[in-house]
Image (cartoon, grey):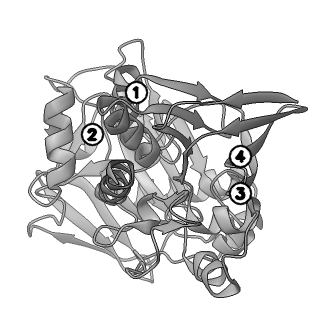
């Protein structure tokens, strides 16, 4: 067994290198805390994941969360300014389409619900990458936490076949609450009521599947369309112009980003080729024959992500759920703190919520060190 002990009085172990965990790491580092981050995946970002379409690192599409709303997300706006990250407006010029249950199509010229939204240049991944680059931390990837023991101030984790033991003054879980409750053993009696509350909190994106259709030109724009579709026919339920940032109407690729309307169980009943054919047929019905001239299709089914999704997430909500505001944020004599977007009071499930929950824990940790 490998033992890692952090000996100063301001040492913190953060479980999860998603946005909440990395942002808290960034802030704690600025205050002189020694931070070790344990991440089960082989990458940082958690549910934030962007894929490049070409050699230019700015030309990315988002496979996880994508939109930012500067007017409504003050923490995120401040952080983007601090990190000198740029955003660009979500493309909404043109008409949107509404597909009826029988497949009929209505064209609407009204304002888009995404009119005030933006996306990050380089994709949302640029945010977590910049946080990681600017943080003084020790990062362990492929390290899956097994247990947390408040009495010995120890976290046990597996990295391959090796058991690792980490000791620190504080532990912060930035995992989805359901994942924490069902995969990590807490060596103390925190009560069945709290565990059941955690298990009942849906993990946002966990049951979702995004498909990105990449083209060499934005032909929908030539038709006076924004690319925005809301469908009750399917299999794609929502479609948006997900094209990467480009200063001109030319670039490595233009994209229609979509959400699959079938739930995870329904998706398992069809093959990938069947799903692809049905989606292309729908796109052709919506946008014409050019929609079949796809250069690349990227599929990200989050229900297949063991580090995100539990079986109870597979029939999860398609609409944004309500998240509980009254769950305790610190346990076990303030040794264990709970962050992550599902633990946010105001913006649960959103990027802003990930920052909000981290700020809450930051204030509690700084307060505990000052006592």
Give the x, y percent position of residue 85.
20, 29
Of label 1 and label 3, which has the lower sequence position? 1
Q: Quadrant of the N terminus?
A: top right
- Helix, strand or loop at disc 4? strand
Most extreme residue toward the top is 55
Q: Quadrant of residue 303?
A: bottom right
Count of number-bearing discs: 4
Distance from Cα at disc 4 to Cα at disc 1: 28 Å
Of label 2 and label 1, which has the lower sequence position? 1
Q: From the viewer's perspective, is the residue at label 2 or at label 3 nearer?
A: 3
Which residue corresponds to the image point at 71% horizontal and 33% vertical from the top-left?
142
Q: Are marks 1 and 3 in contact (CB under 8 Å)?
A: no
Left or right, residue 33 beside residue 195:
left
- Helix, strand or loop at disc 3? loop
Left or right, residue 173 beside residue 254:
right
Q: Where is mark 3, residue-wise?
A: 151
Q: Is disc 3 surrounded by few (<14), some (14 to 19) or many (20+) residues within 10 Å?
A: few
Distance from Cα at disc 2 to Cα at disc 4: 56 Å
Most extreme residue toward the front is 371
Front in this rendered view, residue 311 or 95: 311
Give the x, y percent position of residue 92.
15, 52
- Helix, strand or loop at disc 1? helix
Q: Where is mark 4, residue-wise?
A: 154
Q: Which label is found at residue 335?
A: none
Give the x, y percent position of residue 349.
40, 64
């Amino acid at each position: 067994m490998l033992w890692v002990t952090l000996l100063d009085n301001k040492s913190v172990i953060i479980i999860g290198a998603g946005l909440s965990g990395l942002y808290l790491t960034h802030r704690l580092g600025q205050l002189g805390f020694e931070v070790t981050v344990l991440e089960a995946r082989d990458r940082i970002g958690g549910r934030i994941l962007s894929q490049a379409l070409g050699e230019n690192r700015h030309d990315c599409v988002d496979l996880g969360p994508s939109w930012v709303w500067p007017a409504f997300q003050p923490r995120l706006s401040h952080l983007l300014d601090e990190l000198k990250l740029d955003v660009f407006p979500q493309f909404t010029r043109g008409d949107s389409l509404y597909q009826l249950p029988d497949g009929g199509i209505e064209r609407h010229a009204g304002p888009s619900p995404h009119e005030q939204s933006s996306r990050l240049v380089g994709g949302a991944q640029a945010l977590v990458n910049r946080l990681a680059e600017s943080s003084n931390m020790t990062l362990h990837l492929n390290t899956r936490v097994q247990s947390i023991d408040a009495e010995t101030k120890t976290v046990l984790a597996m990295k391959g076949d090796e058991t690792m033991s980490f000791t620190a003054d504080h532990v912060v879980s930035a995992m989805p609450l359901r994942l924490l409750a069902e995969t990590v053993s807490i060596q103390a009696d925190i009560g069945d009521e709290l565990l059941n509350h955690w298990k009942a909190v849906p993990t946002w994106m966990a049951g979702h599947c995004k498909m990105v259709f990449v083209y060499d030109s934005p032909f929908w724009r030539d038709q006076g369309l924004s690319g925005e579709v809301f469908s009750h026919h399917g299999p794609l339920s929502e479609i948006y112009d997900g094209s990467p940032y480009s200063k001109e109407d030319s670039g490595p690729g233009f994209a229609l980003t979509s959400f699959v309307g079938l739930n995870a169980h329904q998706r398992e009943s069809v093959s990938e080729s069947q799903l692809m054919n049905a989606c292309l047929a729908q796109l052709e019905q919506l946008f014409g024959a050019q929609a079949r001239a796809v250069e690349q299709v990227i599929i990200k089914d989050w229900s297949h992500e063991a580090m995100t999704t539990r079986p109870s997430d597979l029939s999860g909500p398609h609409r944004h759920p309500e998240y509980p505001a009254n769950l305790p944020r610190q346990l076990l004599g303030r040794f264990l703190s709970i962050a992550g977007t599902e633990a946010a009071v105001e913006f649960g499930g959103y990027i802003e919520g990930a920052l909000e929950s981290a700020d809450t824990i930051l204030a509690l940790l700084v307060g505990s060190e000052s006592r």
